[in-house]
Amino acid sequence: MHVSLNFERYLNAASACGPDARFLLEVIVGVPECRHKPRQAIRIKSFAKTLGLDETVVSGGLSELVAAGVLERLIAPRGGQVGRGKVTYVLCPGNEAWLADHTYPQHAELLQALFSGADMTFSVLGRELRKAEPDEPGEDEAVAKFKKGKNLLSGGRGRLSIRNRLLFAVLLSRSDQFGEVQIGVPRLAWLTGMKPEQVKTRLDRLMMLGLIRRHIPGLSSKVFATGRIESTYFLNIDALRPQGAIAVHITGDGDGKNFTHADLLRRDCTNAKGGILGVETPNSLVSLLAGQQSRVFLVFQNLLYRYASRLLSCHWQKLAADLPVEDSELIAWIANDFIKFPKSGPAVENDLEHEAGPDDVEASFLKDGPDGAADQTCAQIYELALEVAHEYRSRFGQVNWVDFATADIRILPTMDDLGYRAITILFQPVLVGLDRFSVLAERTRGIVELWPVANETDLVLQNRMDFGLVSLPRKVRRAMRKQ
């Protein structure tokens, strides 16, 4: 669900304003008192105290809004006394129409906290990771056994600045119920009033504070219908308190689950032989993906997760009974992602959702029509999504006392090199028989046991990274590998 923040309705007027001014504007037009009393005066000192900000930051932001014609500066008469009267700020006349009741329909509690004076601090994931030693020789460190004790990564507490709050709020307002959002850096820069490099730096900061669980970088490729896929972020919507539930499953068959479908596709497209799970790769998929960089396959796998999430949410019982699953809406999703349909209407210039760059390529060569391979290719992608859904259904179905059929489910991508050895799902609502956070470890075929953890923060950092619960910025990961 795409929902604009309140300040965005003023962006035409406030486009020259920086992030501090935009943050203050969201507070001004978003709080109930201002909606009911649009001409309520704002004083710098009290406003800064309420928000816990330096007065110079507030003064500078309000001055930018005055220059943009959004706010009006009022100076009270001194009645003949020496000196300047008290300075206050109000919304300019004529803006009352913008102040109709507008509540946040999703993630309201977290958004309201972001635009309040609440002191929002989070544990910093840190800058150094000491790898856990395996419990036994030959144990796979990538999916390590549960280890008691404190987290192996040192770090402190990090306060969320107003610019980081604004960026996180923009992401959050555009995310779905599970916190997934797809958006490019140029769009984020335009919305926040920051430069693209500043956005990237602050995205890294949000990652270090655990507010971005996973990041799937966007890229340009003729594989996709538009020629480009924007970055995908999985936000930590549980930052204040749990909003749903998380379950992780660790297989007992580490060797047999060592690859994802994307891994096998990449191998087959490179070698032109072999097959997906023992079946020869269809020629149309090889044609679609042959010669593509490895990052394309990661994005392709994330799309399979998205499609499989819908299948799990809507067809859990059919998947359990191994019945045919026909989902016309999902087929339409796939077609929209991969088939280049003729454009209708005039081209839109200055599209802020996508800013052309040097890596941009022509849109997908999959064409709609009787002489094209589009329908066949999309049908094959649909079959791959079904295979992913069956894998997740069979694994989490091992807790057969839990009725997943009543939940909305979203697959959270785990560490790229894990294959399907460890898989994670987010689901809403919380279900009877499972806590809000559960790790299910398969000890014998079809039999799982629960790790003794109540919260994701009880896990060591390596486990949290493996399971897709947190990520570290690329530069931090590179530094770790050099140690």
Image: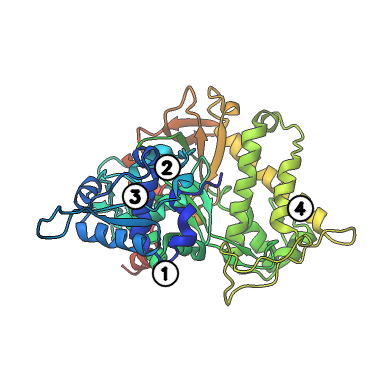
Task: Identify the image quadrant of residue 240.
Answer: top left
* Mark 3 surroundings within 10 Å by alpha-carbon count, few (fewer than 14), some (14 through 19), many (20 or more): many
Q: Is residue 138 visible?
A: no
| Label 4 secondary element | helix
Quadrant location of the C terminus in the rendered image: bottom left
Closer-to-camera residue (182/113) = 113
Q: Quick check: marks 3 and 4 in contact, CB under 8 Å?
A: no
| Label 1 secondary element | loop
Alpha carbons under labels 4 and 1: distance apart: 38 Å
Task: Identify the image quadrant of residue 272.
Answer: bottom right
Q: Which mark is residue 237?
A: 2
* Mark 4 surroundings within 10 Å by alpha-carbon count, few (fewer than 14), some (14 through 19), many (20 or more): many
Q: Quick check: marks 4 and 1 in contact, CB under 8 Å?
A: no
- Left or right: residue 399 versus residue 438 is right
Please tell me whether mark 3 or mark 2 is closer to you in this view: 2
Q: Earlier in the sequence, mark 4 or mark 1?
A: 1
Q: Position of residue 180 (x, y in %)?
A: 51, 48
- Left or right: residue 302 versus residue 119 is right
Q: Quick check: marks 1 and 2 in contact, CB under 8 Å?
A: no
Q: Kindly identify the amino acid type of the residue bearing the numbered disc 3.
A: Leu
- Left or right: residue 427 versus residue 110 is right
Q: Earlier in the sequence, mark 3 or mark 2?
A: 2
- Left or right: residue 235 versus residue 380 is left
